[in-house]
Image: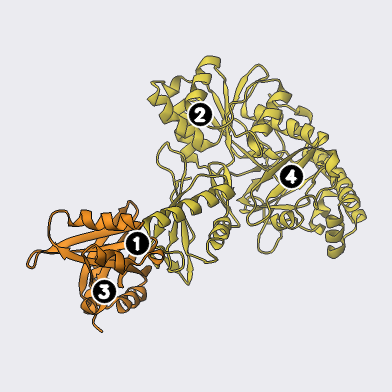
Amino acid sequence: MIWKEDIETMPLEDLKNIQSERLAALAKYVYKNCPVYKTKFDDAGVRPEDIKSIDDITKLPFTTKIDMRDHYPFGLFSRPRTDLVEIHVSSGTTGNPTLVGYTRDDIALWSDVMARTLCCAGAEPDDTIQIAYGYGLFTGGLGFHYGALEMGLTIIPTSSGQTKRQLRIMQDFSPRILACTPSYALYMVEEAKEMGLDPKASSWEIGVFGAEPWSESIRAEIESEWNMLATDVYGLSEIIGPGVSQECHYKDGLHIYSDVFYPEIIDPETGRAVAEGEDGELVITTLTKQGIPLIRYRTRDIVSMTAKPCRCGRTSPRTSKIKGRTDDMIVVRGINVFPSQIEHVLLGIDGTHPHYQIIIDRQAHKLDSVDIMVEVDERIFSDEIKKMRELEARIRDEIQAVLSVGVNVKLVEPKTIQRSEGKSKRVIDKRSL
Amino acid sequence: MAQQLTIFVENRPGRIKSVSDILMANNLNIWAFAIQDRGEFGLIKVVVDRPEQARLALADHGFACALKDVLAVTAPDKPGNLDRLTTALLNSNVNIADAYGFVTPNDRQGMCFLEIKNAQEVNLEEVVTAAGFTIVKDEDLYEV
């Protein structure tokens, strides 16, 4: 079924009218309520009255992750803190984390787009869903929760981890829908086999997988191991959390809810639109959000987009899976990791700047592992094994505290990390995503 | 006091040789050595005849290394001597962080190198000689 059939199958002309109305209202709203946007508009020489149609969007300035960081915590908000009913925080690239907040209407919007997402994946109102995304400051768990609540599904909020328990609950309550990261879905295969279960006989028929990039080969593996349909969900906390776009059962691109999240694909260098179907950076404008609406937010995700309506009947444009990033962000077990965060921690250790390398790997059916090699130079070297162990543990603990991801730290000899053109290659990603 | 050079090495084939290569190339004579293993990496500890030169040579090749004072003690090779030494050190509250020792077969002399945690707090020479042992003089270890 299609959750919001009138909107999701709306003729493109009508859709464009809605987008135009909403963008004009949004421009006035942020100009009036958010001093940061007022300055941005003024600097760009654009007045809210100039925005009459969705095509005028290119007159508006971009918003970037740096804006989020610079105006932390509430500078980019258009509503006072007292109007917010929920906030979520994710670790930032360096220094300030990224804060997003929702008004009651924003939560209603989130519930709506997540209900659309679950329907798009194939959920029916009588279904039971097992939500194995983390609940908490990460938007994954609660986003799915709100959508499932909106749809009237029976929710099993297992959150992430405790795999044996996840599988026992699956056996006991036979949920048809599973929501988690694709790597966790694969990881659970092994655990199931160890417990003597036949993954192919599981109750899960549909998976809604996201929060990290994954390939068609991973999809094929999940689908054959669990005997289920594996669909891709996309989102980012800055925009709403999960629920920006979702694949239907045709698995031919992700339907982006363009009546509320207006997408553009641009050349990240020039900032200009690329031709339809070409790869570029996904830029999103939140047309109806209240708490922290964002104008032309640069997601840094590289995708392509098509406006051709899908066989499923939905008329909104579809994006490809994420093909890359415009920055050096890597996603590990659903958590965004920037090499600069690790660099920041190492800088704090005795004021030195050791060379380091991050190696990310994924053994078959295992969770991603993060090994951080740190060169031991004269300044951090101690002639006692105990102190070296302490140093290793300290680096590990501090990095884990910043990233919220478990890591292994390996001390290596000076000059052993490869330098290319003076700058070492910071990240080696061995995963086949 | 004797000086020990501690070198950080990764635990993989050839790393000890890479250190001994550099020592040989600089014509350095090794008095004693010990290796500590910590899984991913280890520490090589060596006492050589020209410690500072060894340190510079190794640092030139990119090794992380450090020089540290160690107590070098000799005693005739007799049963109970190590116990007598450790008893004397214990009675003076000397804290031993690390130690390695050996016997030279020809003249049956025992020799041991001790890293002392609280070397500043104790008159080590007094304690060791009072117990009947000899501290190896710098001129016997080093080319002056």
Residue at x 32% of width, y 73% of height: B58
| Residue located beneath label 3 in the image | B22
Find residue A429 and report its horizontal and vertical position in percent.
46, 52
Find residue A179 and report its horizontal and vertical position in percent.
58, 30
| Residue located beneath label 1 in the image | B116
User: Dot 3, how many residues are within 10 Å of its Cα: few (below 14), some (14-19), or many (20+)?
Assistant: some
Comparing B11 with B107, the one in front is B107
The lab-note entry on whether marks 3 and 4 share a chain reads no
Q: Chain ID for label 1?
A: B
| Residue located beneath label 2 in the image | A162
Mark 3 against mark 2, which lies toward the viewer?
Answer: 3
Q: Chain ID for label 3?
A: B
The amino acid marked with disc number 1 is Ile
Left or right: residue A39 compared with residue A392: right
Q: Colour of chain A?
A: yellow
| Residue located beneath label 4 in the image | A100
The amino acid marked with disc number 4 is Val
The amino acid marked with disc number 3 is Ile
- How far apart are the alpha carbons under marks 1 and 2? 47 Å
How is the protein colored in the picture? by chain
| Chain identifier for the orange-coloured part of the image | B
